[in-house]
Image (cartoon, grey):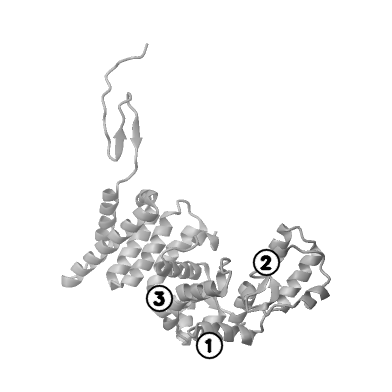
């Protein structure tokens, strides 16, 4: 027989009681509690200012806190519990402090993106450490330096495997690269300061931007082959899926792959012999346009890319290798521009 003893409920802070003897479910901290903690952190730690400056700083701190909490609720509501951790409170105060000093909206949005990513890191991992450092470094950078990090990150550290035709490539450049082009700076001081800030190091060897397009998106710049060239390779019977009409000359054929890696993975999937796979890779490489032709093709479609090619060749842009902090800030700046982007853990883990 079940006991019918008194079922008195006691609701503690941030908890919900259910009428079933004495079960209590803890829901964690509330949004209002986190908001209060955040503002208390700022008031307790920010240096005392006088007159109007004090009011401006307080208003900016409240503004960045509200914007952060709004985005946190949208992207990672469970991150509210981070407010109880000293390390996160320090990161939050860094954001408040830097935004209170300058009030720059673009910087504020960048810091918010970095801080939201920081809330997703519960353990002390390399990614958490990098994000903490990025919050301190980003306010030291100018818009042209942020643009440089973004372009280097996009063109040196990412490949978009979905670019199946020229129109998709042009859209990709318009959406992801073009917004940063007017801000690019060729002055040595730009890259010297990025190095000083810990965002990267100059390499004695300049990378060629054309190599990015040839190696990552070569299938879009194929001149194709004719039937006699394919026959000369003496391939065994290969599936039609390995071939398509040349994107630049529909009277010819090309290997149906964006780059060498796709040729190999597709051939393996179709169980093509290793010997034929190597022949297909060679056909893919041999049919590509040369560097001059690729550059002309891109600039003809998107004239602003001429600036990118020139900057890459004539400034530190093409010689700069990013550190983990540089990658994190470049990633956050791209994400701020696009609204969303692949998780940072793809590059830092």
Name the residue: 45% across, 85% down: 185
Say if 1 sits above or below 79 in the image: above
Residues packed near mark 3 inside 10 Å, few (<14), some (14 to 19) or many (20 plus)? some
The residue identified by callout 1 is 310
The mark nearer the N terminus, 3 or 2, is: 3
Residue farthest to the top, as pictured: 1
Q: Quarter-wise, where is residue 26 in the image?
A: top left
User: Residue 73: image x %, image y %?
Assistant: 34, 53
The mark nearer the N terminus, 1 or 2, is: 2
Left or right: 90 as drawn, with respect to 289: left
Q: Are marks 1 and 2 in contact (CB under 8 Å)?
A: no
Q: Quarter-wise, where is residue 135 in the image?
A: bottom left
Say if 188 sits above or below 93 in the image: below
Which residue occupies the foreground of this view, 310 or 327? 310
User: Residue 257: image x %, image y %?
Assistant: 66, 68
The residue identified by callout 3 is 141
The mark nearer the N terminus, 3 or 1, is: 3
Disc number for residue 261 = 2
| Quadrant in which the C terminus is drawn | bottom right
Which residue occupies the foreground of this view, 326 or 136? 326
Say if 61 sits above or below 83 in the image: below
Residue 310 shows in this picture: yes
Residue farthest to the front, as pictured: 251
Point out the frontmost of discs 3 and 2: 2
Which residue occupies the foreground of this view, 342 or 97? 342
| Quadrant in which the N terminus is drawn | top left
Give the SS element for disc 1: helix
Residue farthest to the left, as pictured: 51
Report the Cα–Cα distance between label 1 and label 2. Answer: 28 Å
Q: Disc count in the image?
A: 3
Residues packed near mark 2 inside 10 Å, few (<14), some (14 to 19) or many (20 plus)? few
Give the SS element for disc 3: loop
């Amino acid at each position: 027989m079940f006991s019918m003893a008194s079922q008195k409920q006691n609701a503690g802070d941030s908890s919900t009681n259910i009428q079933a003897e004495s079960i209590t479910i803890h829901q964690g901290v509330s949004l209002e509690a986190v908001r209060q903690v955040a503002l208390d952190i700022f008031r307790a730690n920010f240096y005392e200012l006088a007159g109007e400056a004090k009011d401006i700083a307080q208003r900016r701190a409240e503004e960045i806190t509200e914007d952060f909490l709004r985005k946190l609720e949208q992207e990672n509501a469970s991150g509210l519990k981070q407010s109880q951790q000293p390390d996160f409170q320090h990161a939050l105060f860094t954001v408040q402090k830097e935004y209170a000093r300058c009030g720059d909206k673009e910087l504020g949005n960048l810091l918010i993106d970095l801080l939201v990513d920081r809330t997703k890191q519960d353990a002390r991992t390399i990614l958490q450490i990098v994000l903490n450092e990025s919050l301190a470094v980003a306010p030291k950078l100018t818009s042209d330096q942020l643009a440089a990090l973004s372009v280097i990150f996009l063109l040196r550290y990412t490949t978009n495997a979905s670019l199946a035709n020229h129109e998709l490539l042009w859209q990709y450049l318009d959406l992801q690269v073009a917004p940063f082009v007017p801000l690019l700076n060729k002055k040595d001081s730009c890259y010297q300061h990025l190095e000083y800030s810990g965002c990267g190091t100059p390499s004695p060897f300049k990378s060629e931007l054309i190599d990015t397009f040839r190696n990552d998106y070569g299938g879009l710049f194929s001149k194709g082959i004719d039937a006699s060239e394919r026959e000369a390779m003496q391939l065994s019977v290969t599936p039609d899926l390995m071939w398509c009409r040349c994107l630049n000359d529909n009277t010819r054929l090309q290997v149906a792959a964006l780059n060498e890696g796709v040729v190999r993975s597709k051939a393996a999937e179709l169980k093509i012999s290793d010997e034929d796979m190597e022949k297909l890779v060679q056909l893919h490489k041999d049919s590509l346009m040369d560097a001059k032709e690729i550059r002309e093709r891109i600039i003809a479609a998107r004239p602003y890319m001429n600036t990118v090619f020139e900057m890459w060749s004539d400034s530190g842009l093409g010689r700069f290798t990013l550190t983990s902090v540089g990658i994190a800030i470049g990633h956050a700046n791209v994400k701020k521009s696009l609204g969303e982007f692949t998780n940072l853990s793809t590059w830092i883990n």
